[in-house]
Image (cartoon, grey):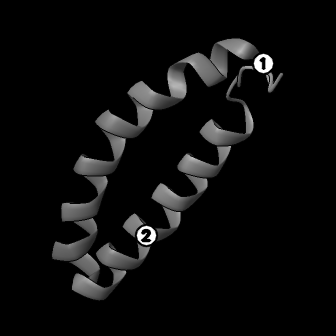
Amino acid sequence: MNNTVFKLLPLAGVVVVPQVVPRLMVHLGIGAGVAFAVVVVCLWFALLVSRAEMPGHG
């Protein structure tokens, strides 16, 4: 993926997830909202960690 996309991931996660989860809970039920939140947050975290620049050990 493009670096620009990864720079926007934190902002996208903060804006989109809190808006989508309550709407899913209203229309599909609490379980769907919780499941969506868990899956999306885990994927979001994995993408951010995979692209993190860590300092060297040594």
Image quadrant in which you'd find residue 47: top right
The spot of residue 42 in percent (x, y) is: 54, 60
> Badges 2 and 1: C-beta atoms under 8 Å apart?
no
Q: Quadrant of the C terminus?
A: top right
Image quadrant in which you'd find residue 5: top right
The spot of residue 44 in percent (x, y) is: 55, 48
The spot of residue 39 in percent (x, y) is: 51, 68
Q: Quadrant of the N terminus?
A: top right
* Above/below status of 6 relative to 42: above
**Label whose residue precedes the other's in the sequence (2 or 1):** 1
Disc 1 residue crowd, few under 14, some 14–19, many 20+, Cα 10 Å: few
Q: Name the mark on residue 2.
A: 1
Which amino acid lies under the numbered mark 1 shown in the image of this protein?
Asn
Q: Name the mark on residue 13.
A: none
Disc 2 residue crowd, few under 14, some 14–19, many 20+, Cα 10 Å: few
Residue 50 vs residue 37, the one in the foreground: 50
- Identify the residue under disc 2: 38
Which amino acid lies under the numbered mark 2 shown in the image of this protein?
Val
Residue at 66 percent of width and 12 percent of height? 4
Q: Secondary structure at mark 2?
A: helix
Image quadrant in which you'd find residue 38: bottom left
Horizontally, residue 28 falls left or right of residue 3, namely left
